[in-house]
């Protein structure tokens, strides 16, 4: 999700990986906004473990990435440490 907005236009989801103890996600998300606008935003990433119930999911961790600190033109392939709560 792109912050500070919390609406459907700024939210993206990866595909669900079922019955996989080591899921890999190699997905790309694109947002319709200028580079200048992107640099004023944060990307909030949440990792959840879905249970059998459709209504509940356990938050494994989350991270907020300050887009002003990233070279948006060339992209980034990097690991980010998850926290229990966004900082």
Image: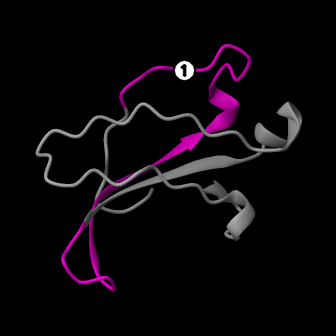
| Residue 54: percent from left, percent from top | 31, 82
On the picture, is 76 further left or further right than 85?
Answer: right
User: Can the viewer see residue 44 in this picture?
Assistant: yes
**Element type where label 1 sits in the image:** loop
Please, is residue 44 above or below residue 72 in the view? below
The image shows residue 32, relative to residue 35, as above or below, that is below
Across and down, in percent, residue 47 comes to 34, 55
Residue 17 vs residue 7, the one in the foreground: 17
Q: Give neighbour class at mark 1: few <14, some 14-19, many 20+ (Cα, 10 Å).
A: few
When asked about the image quadrant of residue 39, the answer is top right
Indicate yes or no whether the magenta region holds residue 55. Answer: yes
**Above or below, 80 relative to 78:** below
Near-viewer residue (10 or 19): 19
Q: Which image quarter holds the N terminus?
A: bottom right
Q: Measured along the vertical axis of the image, is residue 77 above or below residue 54?
A: above
Q: State the residue at coordinates (27%, 50%).
A: 17
Q: Position of residue 63 (x, y in %)?
A: 42, 49
Residue shown at 67% from the left, 19% from the top: 71
Task: Say which quarter of the image contains residue 36.
Answer: top right
The colour scheme applied to this rendered structure is one colour
In this view, the residue farthest toward the front is 18
Q: Quadrant of the C terminus?
A: bottom left
User: Which residue matches tag 1?
Assistant: 76
Region in magenta: 50-79
Asked if residue 5 shows in the view, the reply is no
Q: Outermost residue, top direction?
A: 74
Residue 8, by quadrant, is bottom right
- In percent of width and height, residue 57 lies at 28, 74
Taking the spot 74% from the left edge, 62% from the top edge, the residue there is: 9
């Amino acid at each position: 999700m792109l912050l500070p907005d919390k609406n459907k236009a700024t939210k993206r989801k990866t595909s669900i990986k079922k019955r996989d103890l080591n899921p890999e996600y190699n997905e790309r998300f694109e947002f319709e906004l200028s580079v200048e606008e992107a640099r004023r935003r944060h990307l909030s990433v949440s990792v959840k473990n879905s249970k059998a119930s459709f209504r509940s999911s356990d938050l494994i961790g989350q991270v907020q990435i300050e887009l002003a600190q990233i070279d948006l033109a060339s992209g980034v392939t990097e690991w980010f440490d998850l926290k229990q709560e966004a900082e």
